[in-house]
Image (tube, rainbow, N blue to C red):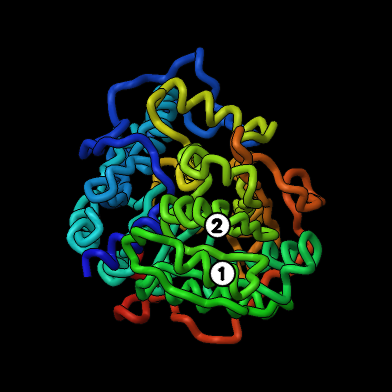
């Protein structure tokens, strides 16, 4: 069971940041507003500010502080990307004066993979809201979160009971209930970029319940885009000592396009065997956990020989000229210079920005209802330019925008996916699943309603 759960983390918990754990309180307290630091971020003005907010209108809010929970599996994965993002944002924000003068205190809720429920109970006792975090088994804490009416602004969600659950506002959603997050990207791959690959698509997944579901969704997505699945396989969740049999099966089936769901370290090993056999596919969808320099290094010669591509799902790439992206990189360099900026970390930063903007608008009466209503009023949220526009007021159907990157030995760079809106392409409508893969949990499921949110 532990092996299968570790594989889930490798797939859904995000790509690697620097090693190290998080303290219980990251980035809180002490700092005062600084004239040398801008309060603007990208297209957002006055994100954080000094002030004299008064009162303690609800749990986690006092005259001087706002207690915020940050979920992470850092104690298990040693991946501190959410802790790092919290440190960077709160350090910057508190230097500007906080939220109307209230300092942000980020409490790391280290779920250590198996302790999601316990950490959620702790958050329910202390935190005003959850911001900029995620855990591989997040579904284990949704019931407790809704029972205590705790709002969540996650960086990412994983399990089906958590995706789109009540009191959750995703600033840059990677998943929307009932919709495939990669259909637009896959449609471009097999209909436009590599049409010959449509008749021979392969899917390979780590052998765990979560990845099996992701694999089933991928099959529906590919077939809806006009592709034919000729190879569908599982590999042991914690990896394979010899990928040769899998590579031989891929070659014998004549696979031209391969969807891979699992740890990018294992994919690099599979590609090494394929490259050694001189078998080159039209494309390999690495999944966006591979969006890091470590995969490039591990891929070696395969980084140039194989055509590795991925979908960033409407998040501006780190190599873009977007002012917001450049500003975020500068903030990381100032407040967490040893941290690696990952895709989940970028999403986390957008979540912090959304929370801060919504909380600031509430003034003295900073309640959970107010901050949720303010966040959900955003109809074209971009995190100041970090993402394609998201309609948080009506998140279903999701944004159609996607953007693709390809691997080279020099790093990740934009693929030729024909963007039509800045760095994004937004002219392919998202796919609504025809099959039922699970439903998000609601307040009604725990006998609550919005009147219980204070």
Q: Nearer the viewer, residue 272 or 57?
A: 272
Q: Position of residue 95 (x, y in %)?
A: 40, 22
Whole-number angstrom distance, CA of label 2 to CA of label 1: 9 Å
Q: Is residue 425 left or right of residue 312?
A: right
Residue 225, percent across and down? 71, 75
* Residue in front for this viewpoint, 212 or 334: 212
Q: Secondary structure at mark 1?
A: helix
Residue 176 seen anywhere in this rendered image of the structure = yes
Q: Quadrant of the C terminus?
A: bottom left
What residue is at 67 percent from the left and 79 percent from the top?
228
Quarter of the image for residue 282 reads: bottom right
Which residue occupies 27% across, 69% down? Answer: 140
User: Image check: 351 left or right of 317?
Assistant: left
Which of the pair 236/89 is nearer the observer?
A: 236
Image quadrant containing the N terminus: bottom left
Along the viewing direction, whichever of 439 and 321 lies nearer the viewer: 321
Give how far across and how far down residue 395 sits, in percent. 59, 65
Residue 452 in picture, x, y percent from top left: 33, 69
Where does label 1 land, which residue? Answer: 250
Total labels: the figure holds 2
Q: On the picture, is 57 further left or further right than 293?
A: left
Marks 2,1: beta carbons within 8 A: yes
Q: In the displayed structure, does residue 430 sit left or right of residue 180?
A: right
Tag 2 residue: 274
Residue at 48% over, 50% down: 268
| As drawn, 429 above or below 50 | below
């Amino acid at each position: 069971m532990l092996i299968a759960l570790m594989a889930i983390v490798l797939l859904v918990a995000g790509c690697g940041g620097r090693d190290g754990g998080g303290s219980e309180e990251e980035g809180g307290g002490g700092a005062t507003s600084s004239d040398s630091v801008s309060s603007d971020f990208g297209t957002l003005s006055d994100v954080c500010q000094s002030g004299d907010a008064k009162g303690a209108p609800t749990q986690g809010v006092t005259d001087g502080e706002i207690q915020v929970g940050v979920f992470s599996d850092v104690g298990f994965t040693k991946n501190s990307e959410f802790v790092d993002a919290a440190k960077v944002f709160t350090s910057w924000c508190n230097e500007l004066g906080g939220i109307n003068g209230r300092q942000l205190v980020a409490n790391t809720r280290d779920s250590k993979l198996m302790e999601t429920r316990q950490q959620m109970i702790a958050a329910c006792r202390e935190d005003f809201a959850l911001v900029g975090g995620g855990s591989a088994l997040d579904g284990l804490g949704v019931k407790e979160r809704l029972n205590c009416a705790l709002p969540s602004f996650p960086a990412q969600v994983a399990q089906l009971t958590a995706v789109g659950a009540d009191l959750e506002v995703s600033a840059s959603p990677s998943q929307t209930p009932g919709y495939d997050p990669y259909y637009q990207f896959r449609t471009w791959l097999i209909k436009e970029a590599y049409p010959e690959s449509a008749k021979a698509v392969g899917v390979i997944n780590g052998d765990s319940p979560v990845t099996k579901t992701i694999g089933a969704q991928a099959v529906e997505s590919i077939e809806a885009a006009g592709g034919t699945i000729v190879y569908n396989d599982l590999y042991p969740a914690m990896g394979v000592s010899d990928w040769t049999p899998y590579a031989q099966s891929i070659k014998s089936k004549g696979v031209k396009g391969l969807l891979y769901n699992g740890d990018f370290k294992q994919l690099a090993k599979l590609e090494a065997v394929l490259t050694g056999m001189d078998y080159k596919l039209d494309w390999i969808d690495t999944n966006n956990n591979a969006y890091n320099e470590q995969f490039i290094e591990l891929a070696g010669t395969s980084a140039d020989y194989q055509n590795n591509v991925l979908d960033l799902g409407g998040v501006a790439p780190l190599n873009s000229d977007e002012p917001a992206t450049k500003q975020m990189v500068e903030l990381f360099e100032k407040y967490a210079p040893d941290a690696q900026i990952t895709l989940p970390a970028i999403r986390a930063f957008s979540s912090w920005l959304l929370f801060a903007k919504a909380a600031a608008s509430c003034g003295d009466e900073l309640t959970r209802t107010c901050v949720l209503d303010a966040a959900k009023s955003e109809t074209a949220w971009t995190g100041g330019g970090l993402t394609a526009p998201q309609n948080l007021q009506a998140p279903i159907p999701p944004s159609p925008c996607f953007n693709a990157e390809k691997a080279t030995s020099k790093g990740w760079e934009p693929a030729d996916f024909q963007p039509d809106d800045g760095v994004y392409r937004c002219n392919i409508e998202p796919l609504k699943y025809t099959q039922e893969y699970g439903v998000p949990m609601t307040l009604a499921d725990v006998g609550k309603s919005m009147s219980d949110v204070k």
